[in-house]
Image (spheres, helix red, strand yellow):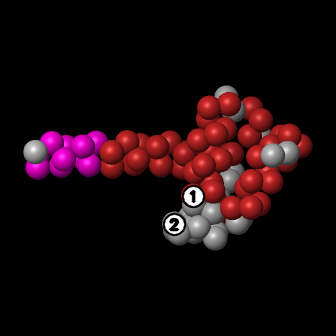
Amino acid sequence: MLLRNFIAVFLLLGIASCYGDEMTVITQKLGLCAGTKASVQWERIFSSDKKMKQYKIDTLPDDLKIRLKLYLIQHAADSDQPTVPGL
């Protein structure tokens, strides 16, 4: 039972790590940094077609837009895990 729980946790951490790495690459390609804006600002960007076009987010598939939005909000300046530019 303990081994099964260990494997489950290991797999979940691996998936989360891959998810984070993928989003890091995408944000770098788009020139975005989650920690430069508060979560409310990211919400506003994703609710405006004009803003999404400005940041080239409109070119992404819908499922990737959703994951990117979640990543940016989870790592926004006012979040528990902010992404700090330059680190």
Answer with the quarter of the image where residue 60 lies: top right
Decide: few, some or many residues near mark 1? Use Cα within 10 Å; few <14, some 14-19, many ≥20.
some
Sequence-earlier tag: 1 or 2: 1
Q: Are marks 1 and 2 in contact (CB under 8 Å)?
A: yes
Residue shown at 41%/43% (left/top)? 18
**Depth check, front residue: 1 or 37:** 1
In the image, which residues are magenta?
Answer: 2-11
Mark 2 is on which residue type?
Answer: Gln
Q: Which residue is mark 1?
A: 74
Is residue 26 part of the magenta span, yes or no? Answer: no
Residue 80, above or below 26: below
Residue shown at 10%/45% (left/top)? 1
Residue 9 vs residue 82: left or right?
left
Would you say the magenta stretch is mainly helix, strand or loop?
Answer: helix
Residue 78 vs residue 1: left or right?
right
Residue shown at 33%/45% (left/top)? 12
Residue 52 vs residue 8: left or right?
right
Residue 63, above or below 78: above
Decide: few, some or many residues near mark 2? Use Cα within 10 Å; few <14, some 14-19, many ≥20.
few
Disc ID at residue 81: 2
Q: Judging from the image, what secondary structure is the residue with disc 1 in?
A: helix
Residue 35, above or below 19: below
Mark 1 is on which residue type?
Answer: Gln
Residue 14, above or below 75: above
Residue shown at 64%/70% (left/top)? 78
- Gap between marks 1 and 2 measured at Cα: 7 Å
The image position of residue 11, as x and y in percent, is 28, 42
